[in-house]
Structure formats: C-alpha cells, structure tokens
Amino acid sequence: MTLTLRRLCGIGAVFAVFLLACTACGGGNGSQPDVSGVEPLTFGVDANTLTLTEDFSTEGDVSKLTVTLAAESFFDLYQIAGTLSYDAESLELTGVSQGSFLGDPPEVIFFHRTDEPGRIPFTLTRRSISAGATGRGVLLRAQFRLLTNRLPVQLVWLEEELVVRDSLRHDIRVSRPGGEGQ
C-alpha cells in the first residue's frame, strides 16, 4: 500500500496534535501550564498567497520596470493559469520569462501570449506526474519600458480569474495581490 504525501502529512499533523495534547496535560496531576504571557506564532504571509513586486530601474534616459509574480507559502502547487494585465498607455512590454519555482524546462511547460497590448495570458504547469512545488519562489517575470513620467495608480495587476491546482488536479484557494482569495 502506497501512502501519498498528503496522507503522510495528515498522519504527521495528527501525531503532532496528540503530542501537544499530552504535553499540555502536564503529566499525572492534570495541571495546565500558564500561557498568559505567550504570544501566538505568526507568519508574514498567509498560506497560498500570490505576490506582485515592481522593481524600477534606469539605464541612461530609459526607465524600466520589472514585475515579478511569486508564490508564497504554497504546498503542492502543480499548475497556475491566469492573465497579468498592465496599463498599455504607460508601459511597453519588452519581455516575459518563466520563474523557476515549478521547475525548469523541460519539466515545466510555460505558455504566454503577448499579441494583445495590456494583457499577458499565461500558463505554467509541471510536465511529469509528480508532486507540485512547496514553499516560495518566482513564477514569472515581465519586463517593461516606461512610456511616460505620469504613472497611473495601478500599472500592473493580476486578473481575477485564476486556475491554481495541486498535483491531484484539485483547485487551490489562493490570496491574490490586491484582492480576496478565490
């Protein structure tokens, strides 16, 4: 019988809760530890969060912008598809490249289109039947040349409709940059 990674993680979580419960009981006398001064553990990013970062640079008299779409705190990310949109009046797309979070070619298939100004539809998926990526890392980068000095409030954004799946092809609920989870 083969146990999947999810089952092993579930078994590990149940065991950890059991050990925590046994430890909290304080042994035979049933006393509870004083936790009044203990702060709960917090992390900077919620699980399954997508982030967009903007990095401006200048070479001579040309201003450039690199936008990075990254995955933060993911477990078993196998596939993502969506559209990165941008203000075509303020930016000219100069390049799109795949990040290495899901893997490198040929183990990852990366499709994108750049024929419609203002939109970059993309798909990243692992090619082999294997577990998805866990942790954090770069999914894709888009490079732009700035066309104006008067920039709008929002230069680049991730469209609401996303497909995000794990290795069993189940949808993953994600927190999006500038938006609620889906």
Image: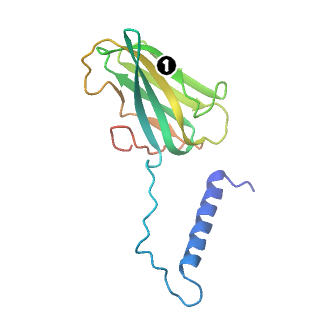
The answer to whether 166 is drawn above or below residue 156 in the figure is below
What residue is pinned by disc 1? 96
- What residue occupies the far right of the structure in this picture? 1
Front residue (pair 130, 137): 137
The answer to whether 159 is drawn above or below residue 16 in the figure is above
**Which quarter of the image is occupied by the N terminus?**
bottom right
- At mark 1, the secondary structure is strand
- What residue occupies the far top of the structure in this picture? 61
User: Where in the figure is residue 171, as x and y percent of width and height?
Assistant: 49, 43
The answer to whether 7 is drawn above or below residue 178 in the figure is below
User: Where in the figure is residue 30, as x and y percent of width and height?
Assistant: 53, 88
The answer to whether 50 is drawn above or below residue 145 in the figure is below
Front residue (pair 105, 94): 94
Residue at image point 30% right, 15% down: 90
- When asked about the image quadrant of residue 157, the answer is top left
Residue at image point 45% right, 21% down: 142
Residue at image point 67% right, 52% down: 4
User: Where in the figure is residue 56, as x and y percent of width and height?
Assistant: 39, 22
- When asked about the image quadrant of residue 88, the answer is top left
**Which quarter of the image is occupied by the C terminus?**
top left
User: Where in the figure is residue 3, as x and y percent of width and height?
Assistant: 70, 55
Amino acid, disc 1: Val
Query: Does residue 44 appear left or right of residue 101 in this picture?
Result: left
